[in-house]
Image: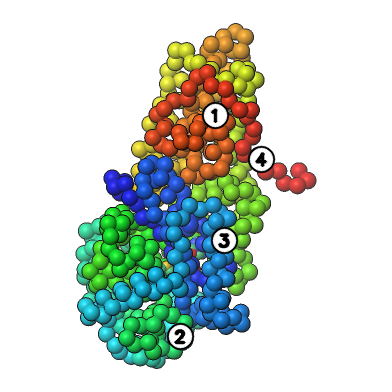
Amino acid sequence: MNNSKKFYVATPIYYVNDIPHIGHMYTTLACDMLSRFMRLDGVDVKFITGTDEHGQKVEKAAMNAGKDPQEFVDTVSQNFRDLASFMRFTHTDFVRTTEPRHVKAAQHLWNVLRERDEIYLGEYAGWYSVRDETFHQESELIDGKAPTGADVEWVTEPSYFFRLSKWQDRLLEFYHANPDFIAPQTRRNEVLRFVEGGLHDLSVSRTSFKWGIPVPNDPKHIMYVWLDALTFYLTALEYPDQSTDFTEFWANSLLVVGKDILRFQSVIWPAFLMAAGLPLPTRVFVHGWWTRDGEKISKSLGNAIDPIQLVETYGHDPVRYFFLREVPFGNDGDFSEPALIGRLNSDLANSYGNLVQRVLSFIAKACGGIVPTPDELTSQDQALLSQADDILPTLRENIEKQTFHKVIEHIWHIIAEANRYVDEQKPWALKTENPTRMGTILYVLSETIRQIAILTQPIVPEASARILDQLAIPHDRRTFAHLEIALIPGITLPLPEGVFPRWVEEGK
Ligand code: ME8
C-alpha cells in the first residue's frame, strides 16, 4: 500500500442524533494515528471524517429536541467538529451530508445508477429499523426486533430499488481476488458467508418523511440515508470530478469502520461503486466495540463516556495511548478508568517517562547539559542503537495491516531494552572513574531516545514533541527520514522536565 505517495483514509461519518462519545472518538483516533505515521513517512494523506445528517432517525431526534432539522444538525454536527479539534486530530476534511457539494455528489451518483438501469421503481413492503436505518427481512427478526435489538416498524411505500442481488457473484469474485480487502479475517469470513447466502435488491428511497436528499426528477422520494451517506467517501474527492487526486487517492484508500456497519462498507458500497462503473476502495478495516462494564455504550443506557472529560482529567497523550494500546485493533474492549490509569503509570510514567527523565537529568547534572561525544562503541551499545535503527520496516508493515497495538508494542520493547541498558551500564557509577565511557553510554541513550521520540509522535504527539524539544531537535528534523541523522555531540540541551507525570489517586 505504501508504494504510492498518496493515501486516503476515512472514518464513518457519524449520525448527529446524539452527542459524540468515546466510540466515535476511537475510530477517528485510530485514523489520526495512521495519518500522522504516514505523513512522517513522507506520504501525502487525505484524512476524512464528518457527519451523517439526514434520515428518519435524525429527523426524529430533531423533533424530540423541538428543533427544525437543519438547526438541529448544525448544532450537533458542530459538537463532532469541536470534538475532533479538541482532540487535535489531523483530518484534512470534514464532510457534512447537508453541504451542497455532498448533495451534488449523491445526486450525481444516483443519476449514474439510474442511467445504467441499476435502480428501478417498485413498492417496498417490509420491516424497517429507524435506529439502525436498516431494512430487514422477516427471517432476520429476533422476537419481533432487529438483530441489534432495535424496534422495527412495518413500512409500505413506493420505493426505488437498487439491483443489489445482481452483484452477488461479482462481489464474491472481487473478495476472492482481493483477500486483503476486508480485515480482519473474521470479518471477511462473516461478509463472505453473508453474500454467499444471497442478496436481495435494496430499497434506496423513502416517501414517508422529508429529511433527506431529493431523488433527482422524482422529489416525492428522498434518497435512502445510506446511499446518501456512503457517497461522502467520494464527496471528499470532489466527485463527480474525477481528477488525478480522485484516481490517485482512491487507488490507495482505507475505510475504517466499527463492526456495526460492516455490511454497508464492504457489501453495499462496493456494489454501488461496481454498478456505477467506479473503482473500489483498497481496503475496509473493521474494528471492534468499546463497552463499559460489558454493556454497549449509548446515551439511552446512560453509560456514554465523554472523551472531552476524559482528556481533561488524564491529558491527550494518556487517552490516545490507552485506546490505541489497550485492545488489539479489531477486537472488542471494555473501558475502565483503572485500566487507563494502569497504562498511564506503567507504560508512560514508569517506562517511557522514566527513561527520558533519568537520562536527560543525568546529562544535565553530570555533563552540564551538553550531549557527550561517544568513544568506541561496545557490542551492547551497538545492539541498543541497532534496535531503533532497524525498527521502521516492522512498524510500516503493522501500519499497513492496521495492527496499531503492535506498532506500540515494538516501540515500547525498545524503551524496555533502553531501561535495561541503563540498569546494566550504570553510567552514574562511572562519573569519576571513567567519564569517557559514561559519556558514550549517555550518548547512546540520548540517540536512542531521539529515535524513539520521533517514532512515538503518531501515538503520543505532545510528549514526543516535548522530548524532542529537550533534545534540541529542530522541528524540521523530526520525520522518519531524519531517523538516520544522529544526534550531534556537543550541543547544549535545555533543562529537562518530566513529560509523563504519574497518576496518583487523591488521598494516596
Ligand atoms: O453508523 N465502540 O453512524 P454512527 C467502537 N452514520 N466504535 C464505536 C462505538 C463503540 N461503542 N460507537 C460508535 C453510522 N462507534 C453511520 C455511518 S458512514 C457512510 C455512515 C464508531 O454515529 C464506529 O466507527 O452510528 C461505528 O462504526 C460508528 O461510530 C457508528 O457511528
Q: Earlier in the sequence, mark 3 or mark 4?
A: 3
The residue lying at 54 percent from left, 29 percent from top is 472
Q: CA distance from mark 3 to mark 1?
A: 33 Å
- Front position in the image: 479 or 238: 238
Using the rendered image of the protein, determine whether residue 201 is visible from the camera's viewpoint: no
Asked which quadrant contains residue 172, the reply is bottom left
Using the rendered image of the protein, determine whether residue 446 is visible from the camera's viewpoint: yes
- Label 4 secondary element: loop
In the picture as drawn, the residue positioned furthest to the right comes out as 507
Look at discs 2 and 4 and give the one toward the viewer.
Answer: 2
Q: Earlier in the sequence, mark 2 or mark 4?
A: 2
Look at the numbered discs 1 and 4 and tell me whether their residues touch, using CB distance below 8 Å: no
Q: Is mark 3 within 8 Å of ligand 1?
A: no
Image location (x, y in percent) of residue 428: 61, 17
* Residue with the mark numbered 4: 502
Q: Earlier in the sequence, mark 3 or mark 2?
A: 3
* Residue with the mark numbered 3: 82
Amino acid found under the numbered disc labelled 1: Leu
Q: Earlier in the sequence, mark 3 or mark 1?
A: 3
Q: CA distance from mark 3 to mark 2?
A: 28 Å
Q: Earlier in the sequence, mark 1 or mark 4?
A: 1
Image location (x, y in percent) of residue 164: 28, 76
- Label 3 secondary element: helix
- Front position in the image: 483 or 403: 483
* Residue with the mark numbered 1: 471
Image location (x, y in percent) of residue 15: 49, 70
Amino acid found under the numbered disc labelled 4: Arg
The residue lying at 46 percent from left, 55 percent from top is 91
Q: CA distance from mark 1 to mark 2?
A: 59 Å
